[in-house]
Amino acid sequence: MTTPQAEIRSLPVPEGLEGERVDAAIARMFGFSRTKAAELAAGGKVTIDGAAAGKSERVHGGAWLEVEMPAPPAPVRVVAEPVAGMEIVHDDEDVVVVVKPVGVAAHPSPGWSGPTVIGGLAAAGYRISTSGAAERQGIVHRLDVGTSGLMVVAKSERAYTLLKQQFRDRTVDKRYHALVQGHPDPLSGTIDAPIGRHPTHDYKWAIVADGKPSVTHYDLVEAFRAASLLDIKLETGRTHQIRVHMSAHRHPCAGDLTYGADPVLAKRLGLTRQWLHAVRLGFEHPGDGQWVEFASDYPEDLQHALDVVRADSQ
């Protein structure tokens, strides 16, 4: 296997970026986060008109900014590995519907060496669609590693095409339950705010002006003294969408320390991840066109946290 090679890219600085810091200019011109841009400059990967440039230097319109782009990640491959706790709730010639446990990724990716849904299916002898990138064949939607719940995986090529179209058309009914801190006002509503990469943290997402349209609908299921259980329907499917939207409205998912949850409450509830579970999934079956729906109970850790917060409210 050959090692991916780094790429050198060079662009003139637009007049509109006159006086900007190098890291800010790189982020704007090459699509990196400010953090990644600063790392490149600190690592000697950036020059201005042929001279090495630090992250805090200022750029001038018309100058040539050259960046040694990071080498693309090495290809990843699917490893057939049993996944403890992954439940098969439906299986036919077109689709398989699973309940993904926490700590499991949908598919392999650079930097992730843990268990995956498609690796677990392969270990169990399932043959899934060959459509899509090699490491994510059959995957038509994903859940965060730290989020549990229902996923559908395409087994046939026809199923992959039709399910992907349903997700693009936003006709799939994806429902989540989230235990969030505090009490949203109003208790039922819609959050419509664009989501994109966080400007300073590569591993996070945020509401940003130039992000992708993102719409989250929520309804109160049950109110407690310190938290609220919400039923959430996604109109779009951005990475970390529920977590970002709820955190931005000052009601992060309980246990979600990445997005501002209270660590004291998380410890009290015994949570080591965000309280978020994909409880229902409905779609038009790609085989016969009939509408099908599936439901999933809360896993043990989330049920325990819910029992604690309910008991504290009595």
Image (tube, helix red, strand yellow):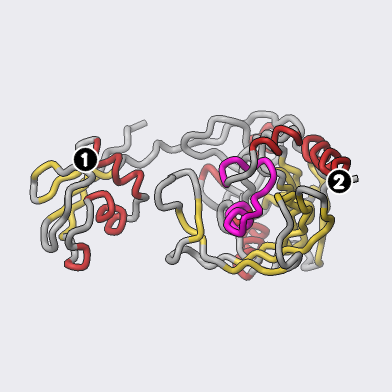
Q: Earlier in the sequence, mark 1 or mark 2?
A: 1
Q: Which residues are magenta?
A: 243-259
Give coordinates of residue 207: x percent, y percent: 50, 60
Q: Residue furthest right?
A: 314
* Mark carried by residue 313: 2
Callout 2: few (<14), some (14-19), or many (20+) C-alpha neighbours within 10 Å? few
133 relative to 124, above or below:
below
16 relative to 59, above or below:
below
Amino acid on which disc 2 is placed = Ser
- Picture quarter containing residue 121? top right
- Magenta stretch: residue 244 in it? yes
Looking at the picture, tell me which residue is in the foreground, 219 or 11: 219
Give coordinates of residue 77: x percent, y percent: 51, 35
- Magenta stretch: residue 33 in it? no
Give coordinates of residue 279: x percent, y percent: 78, 52
Regarding mark 2 in the picture, which secondary structure is present there?
loop
Give coordinates of residue 100: x percent, y percent: 71, 41
* Mark carried by residue 162: none
Residue pointed to by mark 1: 45
Do the residues under discs 1 and 2 have CB atoms within 8 angstroms? Answer: no
Left of 220 or right of it: where is 82?
left
72 relative to 84, above or below:
below
Regarding mark 1 in the picture, which secondary structure is present there?
loop
